[in-house]
Amino acid sequence: MPTQLIENTLPKSCIHYWTNQSDAETCIVFLHSAFMDHTCFDAQIDYFAPRCKVIALDLIGHGVSIGKGDITETSHVVSAILEKENTLKANIVGVSIGAVLAADFANKFPDKVASLCCVGGYDINNFDHNLRLKNNGEHLKIMMAAFFSKKRFTEMCKTFVVTPEAQKKVGQLAMRFKKRQIRHLANIEKLVNQQKKPKRDYPLMIAVGEFENGGLEASQQWHKHEPKSTYIVFKGAGHIANMDVPEAFNQELEKILR
């Protein structure tokens, strides 16, 4: 039976988040991919909730977090949630755009990071110009599809994963995403190459799916910039690797939790 979480809202914000309200010392915060919602982490929540405090939110413009706000403020949102939950530090897990936001949180609130896990992401402190242009081009294609063709957009989102079960879930979430919500993603670029590489006193895991759509090189480059990081390529997985190979992902994530 899936873990039942309690839905919460952040005061003076449209952000909704879910937690098991555990008193466990180990806390994990999950930040999902663009066009999805917090349920992308159902398999991780079921696995970790019995012994960890888990927090999963719908990013601004996603799921039920619909209203005024700027996605570049996500790091401050996460910080406010941790304060509300009386949590000093958390293991931050982000996938795709969630990885960008997780890395930004680590830039701005390093003292609140117990570990950092970024899947399908890139080094936001030193992102190669050519790779950045390529990445932006891929994002633009998906956003254009979301604006003009719901069917094409849904099919493109399904390529984020490779297993039938994950594709079904991703397709359902993509169908719920409204084109008016695209505006919330416009400012994500403002977080890139704005700060120098931080000093990390916590574990960093950089992960990517074997069938990642164009992001393999970016993740490899990031690992070269931070050779002390753990670098994982998940076999049989796509961009949202945690959905394709949840057992393998959970096992690797468990190794860096603090």
Image (cartoon, grey):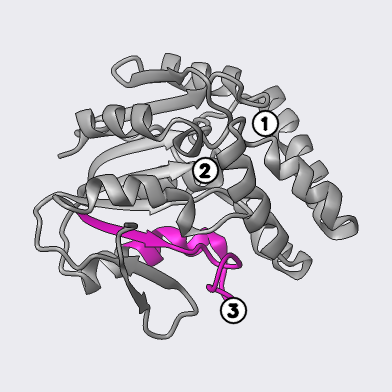
Give how far apart the Cα atoms at labels 3 and 1 are: 28 Å
The magenta region covers 53-78
**Is residue 143 rendered magenta in the image?**
no
Q: Which residue matches tag 1? A: 132
Q: Secondary structure at mark 1?
A: helix
In front: label 1 or label 2: 1
Give how far apart the Cα atoms at labels 1 and 2 are: 14 Å
Q: Nearer the viewer, residue 83 or 165?
A: 165
Q: Nearer the viewer, residue 164 or 241?
A: 164
Residue at image location 22% in from the left, 53% down from the top: 49
Q: Which residue matches tag 2? A: 194
Looking at the image, is 143 positioned above or below residue 163? Answer: below
Residue 58 horizontal side relative to residue 130, left or right: left
Residue 21 position in % (x across, y down): 19, 68
Q: Quadrant of the C terminus?
A: top left
Residue at image location 40% in from the left, 35% down from the top: 246
Residue 146 horizontal side relative to residue 67, left or right: right
Q: Quadrant of the N terminus?
A: bottom left
Mark 1, residues whose alpha carbon is within 10 Å: few (<14), some, or many (≥20)?
some
Tell me if I can see residue 98 in this picture. Answer: yes
| Kind of residue at disc 2 | Gln
| Kind of residue at disc 3 | Lys
Residue 17 position in % (x across, y down): 39, 69
Q: Secondary structure at mark 2?
A: loop
Q: Nearer the viewer, residue 65 or 12?
A: 65
